[in-house]
Amino acid sequence: MRRKHSWNVMVLVLLISSLVLPAVPVQAADHPSHPSVLIVYDSLGMGTKHEGNVEALKRLLASFRVQVTAESVDSYTAGSLNNYSKLIEVRNRSDLLEEQSEFFKDLQSYQGDFLYIGERPRDKLAQMLGLQVQAVQKVADLSIGPFAEKSISVPYFFDSKQAEIRRYGTLKVQALGTSYPYAVQRGAYAYVPFMERDTLSEIAVSYVLKDWLQEDQKSHYFLVFKEIYPFSDLSLLERMSDELFEAGIPFIVSVHPVFNNTDYPAMKRYMNTLKYVQSRNGTVLVEAPVVASTIQDLDRSLYHQMEHFIDVLAQDGIVPLGMGAEMYWSYDEHYVSEGMAFFDSVILFPDARPIYKAKRNRSEAFPSSLYSVNPEFLKRYLADDRLIKPLPMDTAITFNFVEKESELESLVDGLKNSWITFEDYKTEAHSVKTETNELKSERGSLVLNGVNLGIQASHVETSSDYVYKQHGQKSFETWFTVQNKFFIIVIFITLAVFCAFLFIGYRMYKRKFYK
């Protein structure tokens, strides 16, 4: 009897706990474990040519599906290096004394993979790679793959005589008529003499990273259009979809979400257009909402707002396969858990204006992450546009959506004549989950809650007869209407009498003046 009573008490406790404990929201992206890399930098190089190179490096690593922790030498905690098997050190200063720093002490016993970016490699790294200074302070031309950049000032040129060393790119010194490698790598060790944001060295580092990270996955180019809103020229978007479809060019649209008034005709037109874009072999991604500058006033229900928009898309048969966001979103606890939690695939754009809410130094890694690059950036360094092989990582060539027909014609003609081969985003596996919907791609097909969707769609007209605000019950409407008309008539009569008296007074004053 006592055992039965204990059993009943236990069941009662379990029932109460199931009611009291808060429900945990469904996380769409149960991301598998990813390689972890620690970046330690001596300076962000603000105001120098090195400014932004750490951010560029973080974005490159994200495209290789790597979880990154970045911290300065000053903020480094003793023993942290023991938690990582891969280390990247970025040296932007040459005047920093670090012998007493905790990082320098831990580095002496570090045995993991090591990539050094800076003018002077550490002695241990130089010994492992057999590096020797070949020239000092020269101007050289950098070339790697199909890209080239002229007249770069390079402080030091290194090379190695080791047979098994792997060399990347070429630094050709015109004055000497000699060439040296841009970077070298052997096994777990690699050296890069310099890296600057928005230069060819940013791309050159990606070739080194792929081998150093032992990444063997085949890479592709993807065509992406962003800055698409409900108030964009939707007819122009449909026309672009038709022309790209007829040209056999798959593409991606990263569309801004709508959180309120999703039953308005403007929203219906937006949904109809996105469904039509999807039918023309276009892939839909959800772009991160614009963050207000007054960060303390941000809506705290971002999770439910994003979930609502995804469900609205799913309700209309639209299957988003990922998210587009500036890179700083992946380094913010709030944005990761509230905004990015539904997706396992992202495109990380360069940071335009980072506005953090809960900043952290560790990134969120995703199974699929595209490196975003401006087409003008590639053209700037492209030596031969007929030899555009994919970069070492999956790359999104990103355009802002056009606003004029003339711009569209020029854009489409350029894409048709390009030698770049764009891949279909749907051929890879992507998944988006909410509480009520599961959306994904399988071998080029879109799947909504287990049902394989067709991509047929047609132009759908949305009626403009819509009551935006329900009229409340009106009382004494007729009486107030009559009263308003009466007062209007009285006002007009008063104005007429006033004008008559004004005219008569004017005439009398004029006659008196003549006398």
Image (cartoon, rainbow, N blue to C red):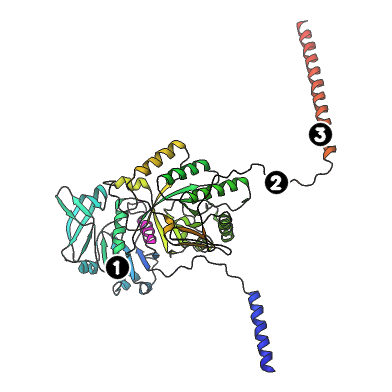
Question: Of callouts 2 and 3, which one flags the residue occurring earlier in the amino acid sequence?
Answer: 2
Which is nearer the N-term, disc 1 or disc 2? 1
Evaluate if marks 1 and 2 touch, with contact meaning CB atoms under 8 Å apart: no
Under circle 2, the secondary element is: loop
The amino acid type, in three-letter code, at marker 2 is Lys
Q: Nearer the viewer, residue 253 or 100?
A: 253
Task: Give how far across and how far down residue 287 sits, in percent.
Answer: 49, 53
Amino acid type for the residue under numbered disc 1: Phe
Q: Which residues are magenta?
A: 46-64
Mark 2 packing: few (<14 Cα in 10 Å), some, or many (20+)?
Answer: few
Do residues under tags 2 and 3 come within 8 Å of each other at their CB atoms? no
Q: Is residue 327 visible?
A: no
Mark 3: few, some, or many residues within 10 Å (few <14, many ≥20)? few
Mark 1 or mark 3: name the one nearer the start of the chain: 1
Q: Assess whether mark 3 and mark 1 are in contact (beta carbons under 8 angstroms).
A: no
Where residue 345 is drawn, which disc sits there? none
Q: Nearer the viewer, residue 382 or 506?
A: 382
Residue 143 visible in the picture: yes
Residue at the spot of label 2 = 469
Is 407 rendered above or below residue 426? above
Q: Regarding mark 3 in the picture, which secondary structure is present there?
A: helix
Q: CA distance from mark 1 to mark 2?
A: 63 Å
Query: What residue is disc 3 on?
Result: 484
